[in-house]
Structures are given as C-alpha cells and as structure tokens.
Image (cartoon, rainbow, N blue to C red):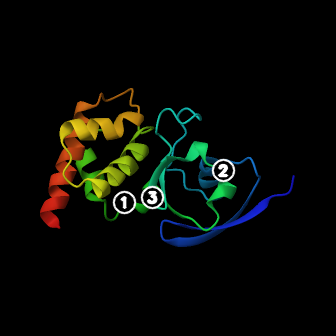
Amino acid sequence: MAKTHVTTTINGDLKEFLCEPGDTLLQVLRDELGLTGTKEGCGSGDCGACSVLINDRLVCSCLVLGVETNGDVIETVEGIGDSDKLHVIQEKFLEHAALQCGICTPGLVVSTKALLEENPNPTEEEARYYLAGNLCRCTGYDKIIKAVLDAAETMRESA
C-alpha cells in the first residue's frame, strides 16, 4: 500500500512525514521522527505511557493513526522541556523522586501538563482521578501525586 504524506505541527515545528495507513502516531513519532521520549507500554491504550496532546487534547498515541494527524498540533514530552531548561513539572518529578524506570514518566508528565492547564488547582483526589489512566509499576503513586500538586502550586505562584 502507498505511504501517505502528512503535514503537522509537532512541538511547535512544522513536520512532514510519510507513513503507512496503519502506522500509529506512536510509531511515527518514534520511528519516523526520532521522538523517542514517548514510550510504548501496552500498545492498547491502557497504560498511558504514550500520552501526547493533539490539539490540546490528551490522547494515547498508540490509538491514533499517523494519517489522522494531518493538520493537527501535537505536543510530546520533548516539547514540554529540555535538558537546558526543564519544565516545572519535570523539576518536581525529579525533586519528589517520582520516577524510576522511566517508561511511564513521559506520559505522566504530558498528562500532568494537560491536567494543570485544565485545572491549575487540583485536589489530591482530582489529580489521582485525572492520572488514573497512567500506570506505574515502579514508584507507586504517592510521590507522583505529591510532585503534581507541588508543580501546580509552583505554577500558580509564578503566574
């Protein structure tokens, strides 16, 4: 089958790529564009490791076809911060030791960003509910939730 030409904006940059009609956005990000921060955990939308924002909507990139993103605006974990200037969410994940193996961390960071854009002052219960689609087998969730709430407070104070 012929590859499809797709033009989209990823992390603020206009990108063009060719993909097979059945390629997931996750495959395109990792294999075609070299954006390997987004991780594959389950491949079925159950773990949240591949979470990205498409047009400011949180989605599992393993459930979206690359061809469906033509004209969309996509944000991956690489667009949230970088090694020179971490985003406050990333800083708080480090400060609270809310990561270990790193498979879930990118999805949690992207999901936290989506949460805090939607609700800058979540309660612990709201944060736990919002992040329920992100599975972590290493850290447990207490450190993650503390990092999320601390990031929310820091972001409110700097606004």
Q: Are marks 2 and 3 in contact (CB under 8 Å)?
A: no
How many neighbours does mark 2 have within 10 angstroms: few (below 14), some (14-19), or many (20 or more)?
A: some
Above or below, 12 relative to 92: below
Provide the residue designation for mark 2: 65
Q: Mark 3 highlights which residue?
A: 78
Give the quarter of the image for residue 142: top left
Residue placed furthest toward the bottom = 14
Q: Which mark is residue 83?
A: 1
Q: Position of residue 28 (x, y in %)?
A: 65, 53
In the image, which is nearer the foreground, mark 3 or mark 1?
3
**Relative to 130, is 5 above or below?**
below
Left or right relative to 37: residue 70: right
Position of 134 with respect to 129 (left or right) is right
Q: Secondary structure at mark 1?
A: loop
Between residues 3 and 105, which one lies in front from this camera angle? 3
Give the Cα distance between marks 2 and 3.
20 Å
The residue under the point 22% across, 55% down is: 120
Mark 1, mark 2: which one is toward the viewer?
Answer: 2
Marks 3/1: CA distance? 10 Å
User: Splitting the image into 4 quarters, where does residue 159 fall?
Assistant: bottom left
Among all residues in the image, which is located at the extreme right? 1
